[in-house]
Each structure stands twice: as structure tokens, then as C-alpha cells.
Image (cartoon, grey):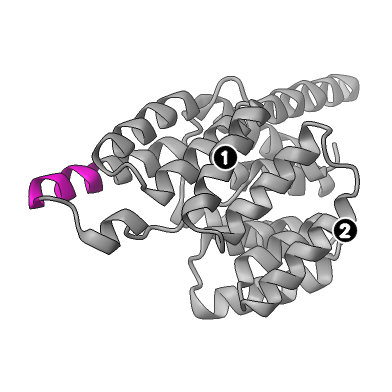
Amino acid sequence: MMTDRKLAKRHLPRQVKARSTHQAKRGLSDGGEVSKLQVLMDKLDTQLLSEKYQKGIATCNKILSIDPTNVRAYFNLGLCNQRLKRYKEAIAYYDNTLQIDPSHLIAIMNRTISLEESGELTETVEAYEEILKLAMVNNNKPVAMIALCNLYRYVECIIICNEILAENPYDPDGLFYKAYALLKIYKIPDALDTAIELLKIQPSNIYALNLIGEAHIFMNNYEIALKAYRTILKINPGDQHALKGVVSIERKLQSFN
């Protein structure tokens, strides 16, 4: 089973932890609200990592009840709806994000992906090329990395990933896209090593486990690949990529008997 572009699209970047525009401009009313907001932010990170998107939506709405112009909450409402394939809602929340912060390039990127997935965007290459230009002008390496991946420019993507990882060796998006791009250009051992590094820092990262499963399939290590996919299903029983992987490997193993 080949790794396809849908896996990379599923791994949409999470909003970087930061104070919201609303909070930064005037400050929240008291320390209690700030403390509650941080607890909700941490809870949201956990929910996103474990793909509990419906719960993530509820948490984002709680954040907005405290901080009504919280950029990160609007962004992640877009992200959760996008992962749930509610593209119309996702686009609307990304629009909310961009009304508050017009320079939010990750929101622009995810909005473009949502338009593509919903069938509303046909000139995808031109769209990603434009995002890449904006990212390069603004020295936004994470967005440039994702745009290059969506343009199938994997070698260039790896170069940007290495620059990101030189600044922060534990950057999860940098590790994911590097592993994904390495797999796409058939540098399987390097892809596997990179995915394992991602799993070390995020043991429940299903995207790392998916890449590990794919790499082991390439290497004909079917039992190890099967273990990776079954681990994903313990975390998220509805993961379609892992379900297909399990079925494919079990059939292959049966054919050997």
C-alpha cells in the first residue's frame, strides 16, 4: 500500500501556541481567566493530537466564551471541521481567523486545502504556488514546507524541513513532512528513522505510526507494519488509513500460508 497525498493533507499543522490578538491587545480581565484559558489550550492540544475533533470544537467554543477574538480557537475550529470533512464550516472559520489576522499563512494554506477537498478549487498548482511565494517573502518556513509538499517538490520540501529541524530538532511538523517526503522519494530507511524520532516525542502520534507502517510495508516487514496500524486503531478505532492497512496486510499474510 503506497503512501498517498491524503496522509499529508490529514496532517494539517496545529496552531502555534501563542497569546491571542484579543488578549495581547488589552489583556484578559483577571488571572483566573488567563489560568482557565491556558488549561483549555492544553486540553485542546491533547484533543487534536488524539483526533478527538468533536471534543476539540467544544473546547474551542469554551475558549471563545472567555476570549471572543482568540485566533487560535477560530483556527482550530477550522481545523477540526476540516478533519471532519465539513469543508464549508472549516472555510468559514478560517475566514474568521483571517479577519482577525490577515497574515495567518497557515489559515490561508488550510483554507486552500479545504477548497480543494470540497471541489471548489480547480487551479490548485497556482494556489499553492502563490502560498509558497507569500511564505518565502515572509520567511515562513512551515508554510513553505507544506506548500512544497502539496506541489510534489519533495526534495525542496526536505531542505526546508532540515532548516526547521536545525532550529528545533523536536518540531513535529518538520519531522512529519521530512519523513513523508523521504518516503515519497523512496529513501525508506531515512523516512523510517525520521518517523521514529517523531514517535519518540509524541508516542500517540498516529501520523508517525502511519508512516512507520508504510515504511515497513516497503521493506516487506509486514508483521511490524501490522503492529503499527493496530496501535493506531487503539488510539483511533475509526482511522480509515490504518483500517485499510490492516486489511491489506492480513490478506497478504494469508496468501503466504
Where's residue 52, x and y in %?
Answer: 46, 28
What amino acid is at disc 2? Glu
- Asked whether the residues under the numbered discs 2 and 1 touch, taking CB atoms below 8 Å apart as contact, a structural biologist would say no
Q: Is residue 47 above or below residue 75?
A: above
Taking the magenta stretch, the answer to whether it contains residue 37 is: yes
**Image quarter of the C terminus:** top right
Residue at the (75%, 29%) spot, across then down: 245
Residue at the (76%, 72%) spot, across then down: 133
| Numbered-mark total | 2
Q: Which residues are magenta?
A: 30-39
What amino acid is at disc 1? Ile
Where's residue 193, x and y in %?
Answer: 64, 62
Q: Main secondary structure of the magenta part?
A: helix
The residue that label 1 is drawn on is 206
Residue at the (60%, 20%) spot, across then down: 238
Q: Is residue 156 above or below residue 194?
A: below
**Image quarter of the N terminus:** top right
Q: Nearer the viewer, residue 56 or 127?
A: 127
Q: Is residue 79 left or right of residue 119?
A: left
The residue that label 2 is drawn on is 126
Where's residue 43, x and y in %?
Answer: 31, 39
Q: Nearer the viewer, residue 122 or 203?
A: 122
Name the element at disc 1: helix
Of the residues under marks 2 and 1, which one precedes in the sequence? 2
